[in-house]
Every structure is written in structure tokens, then in C-alpha cells.
Image: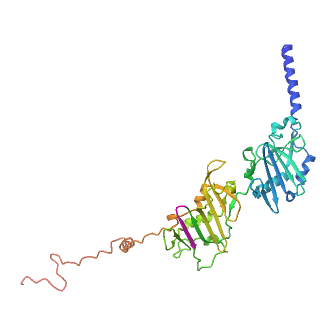
Amino acid sequence: MNSRNLAMVLAIIVGSGLLYYTNEDEYSGPVEIPTAFTSFSDLAVDQVTRVEMMQGDSSVVLEREGEDWKVPSVWNYPGDQPEIERLLLDIQSITGAHQRASKAGSHGTFEVGDTGGLKVALKGSAGNSLADLVIGKADGFQRSFIRVGGSDEVYSVSPNLRNRAGFAGGSLEAGRWTDKMLFQLPSDAVVTRMHIQTPEANAQLNWNSSPEPITEDPSQVTVLSGSDDPLWMVRLSSEVEPVPADETTVKGIITALKNVRAEEPADPADASALGLEPVQSFIEIELADGSIHTIQFGSEQDLSVGGKGVAARVIGNHRTVLVRDWVEESLLKVGEVLRAVVEPEAPPAQVEKADAGIDQTVQAAPAVPGDGEAAEGNPEPDSDG
């Protein structure tokens, strides 16, 4: 190797070393819990009253009101309680720190910079800071990179703070932090009446209390399979008298009422544009305790995540949301689908044939004496006549 080539190689080595030293420290492996991390391990989750999150131009604020969380920027809708609590507990449980860098120039690599990082600040009731960190990209499936607010050091920690629905797609949207449960029928509730209305038809369903004692499991008395005196009767808009309802369809409606989930929030002021004023479609249910609950449905809408949805709201709840179209379809059952199928009785003659395996309805003709046979009581005359 001539001197010119050697000089070039040395220059490359020296330059690479300087670049590495300037931007990134050597991987340190496990280290003792940094002093700045004490704010995480000492975090009293029940003392957190405000969560501020920011990423680029997007920001989300979550506020605690008593025992419940609200999302002020989304019409003060209820927050997703389990998801918010999980975020706080995950921050409290940060462990297994591995230092990966200590220079500001490395922040972009780990996505913990001022622009690309996801800043999370936890505050108490007096506005005091309880924890402040920047969440970067995931480090595998179970770990993520973070930076403590006000410092340049980057750490790989457990758990993976990015692994949650609220941070899906690497973006920050307030609607993802709202409560997704629009209505949930209590597990011990007994439905006694349903009124289903659509622009095309309506149906009234009534539960006839059984003379038998109610079992401890209310789900077992919503319908009675094979009963001669069905628990549910339906009167369709085109009929005067109620008829037995289809047990499977009724049970499907009640099951769907136990998990009516919202896909995304909607502006309650847009009720007219969402087809909720005037209301044309709804399901009203009455429970054994006398309480009445009504879910109203509006017009079809495009969902931000793709696909079609329907506007919906619950009477007495200020929220308006979009639900998947199949949610409406699972609840608004009208027409013949609600009517029990009655099998026609087979004609008696066919029943006899089926039971005996032969045609018992055809009687045998009386026996007629044949040639060379004498009828009973009338002996054949002798040859002498």
C-alpha cells in the first residue's frame, strides 16, 4: 500500500471515530437506575390529574375529574380509562435501562428529538410536574427508547411504551384516547321489552314472564328454546296481534347490546348533518328494574380509518360517535326475521305411514272364494247332485 492510500485509510478511520464520538456513545449495557428515573419509580399514579402529550404539531390533554378521565379537546368526552391507567402504570414500571447515547445529535436516530419525539408530561393537582419524558421508537417488541425531559441521554428501557392503541401508526390523535364503549348492557340485566324502529318498519317485542322461577343466571331466561309458551312475542308494524318471536334472533340482539362499541368520536353539534335530527332509527329497551335505554342511529358516514360507519348516540349521554355499520345491523332487526318459524303439521295419513312403514289407511277387500274352494257354511254338493 503506497503512502497516499494509507493516508486516505487513516483519514477515514479518524473521521469515523470523530463522528461516532460526536453523535453516539458506545452501548453501555445495563446500568444502575439513573437519578432522573426516580420520578418514574416513585410515581403515585392516583396523584396524576393531568397528562399532556405532544408530537410535532399534534397535542392531546387528558384530565382527571374525580375517578374518571376526560378528553377536553374532544368535546370533553369520557377518556379510555383502562388505556390511560395502563400508560401511567407502564411509565411507573420503567426498568432495565441500557444507555444508548448521550449526545443531542443522536436524538433523531432514536426518535426522541424535539420534533419527532413523543413528549409526555404528568402533572399533579397543583400543576406540579410529576414526570417528564420523551418516548422514541420501539426497540424490538418489548422495549422502547426514551429520553428524560431536559437531558440528552438516550436509554433503551422496558416496557415498550409505544405499544398501545393511542400511539398507533406513530401518530397522536385525541380521539384514540376517548372511551370506546357507547353502551353496555349489564351482565345481570333482564330485558323485558324492545321497540325497534327503522324508516321501513318497526317492531314491538315483549317478554312474557315465565311461571317457572328465574334462575341465578339471567342470560338463561332471555329466551326459552322449544317452549310451547314462548317468552318473547313480537308485533310487527303490519300486524295487530303479536306472534311468537324467533328465539335466536332475539338472543342475538340482546348479546349485541352487551358490547356496543364506538369507532371514533363525532361532533354532537352536527346532529342534523349526521342524520340524528330528526331521528328515524332507534332501539329502545326496557329492563326488569324499570329503566329504559335508547340508542339512536343516523346516516352512513366515512370512517377516518377507512370503511363505512353510522352515526349513533345514547339518550341521556352527550356523546355522539360513529360505529361500524355492522353494529347497527346487529341491533335493528325488523320484519320476518323476528317471526318464529312454525313448522306445518303433517297430515294424519302421512304420519301413520311413517310410523308403521306401510299404508295403513287402505283397507283390504273381503276375500272371495276362488275356483275349487267352498265358501264357509256352504259345502260343495256331491256328484249325485
Q: Residue 319 location in percent, x, y?
A: 70, 59
Identify which residue, 318 or 173, lies in the foreground. 318
Instruction: Examine the rendering and report whether any part of residue 78 can be seen.
Output: no
Identify which residue, 36 or 356, lies in the foreground. 36
Q: Is residue 260 left or right of residue 102?
A: left
Rendered-image quadrant of the C terminus? bottom left
Q: Main secondary structure of the magenta part?
A: strand
Provide the residue span drawn in magenta. 199-206
* Up-down relation of residue 237 to residue 42 (above or below): below
**Residue 81 falls in image quadrant:** bottom right
* Up-down relation of residue 291 to residue 75 (above or below): below
Q: Is residue 112 magenta?
A: no
In percent of the image, x 64 and y 50: which residue is there?
303
Q: Residue 351 location in percent, x, y?
A: 39, 72
Identify which residue, 112 or 277, lies in the foreground. 277
* Up-down relation of residue 377 to residue 113 (above or below): below
Q: Residue 279 location in percent, x, y?
A: 61, 61
**Residue 214 falls in image quadrant:** bottom right
In percent of the image, x 67 and y 56: which residue is there?
321
Q: Is residue 361 left or right of residue 154?
A: left
In percent of the image, x 65 and y 57: which residue is there?
271
Q: Residue 103 location in percent, x, y?
A: 88, 36
Instruction: Examine the rendering and report whether any part of residue 349 can be seen.
Output: yes
* Up-down relation of residue 30 to residue 215 (above or below): above
Q: Is residue 98 left or right of residue 303?
A: right
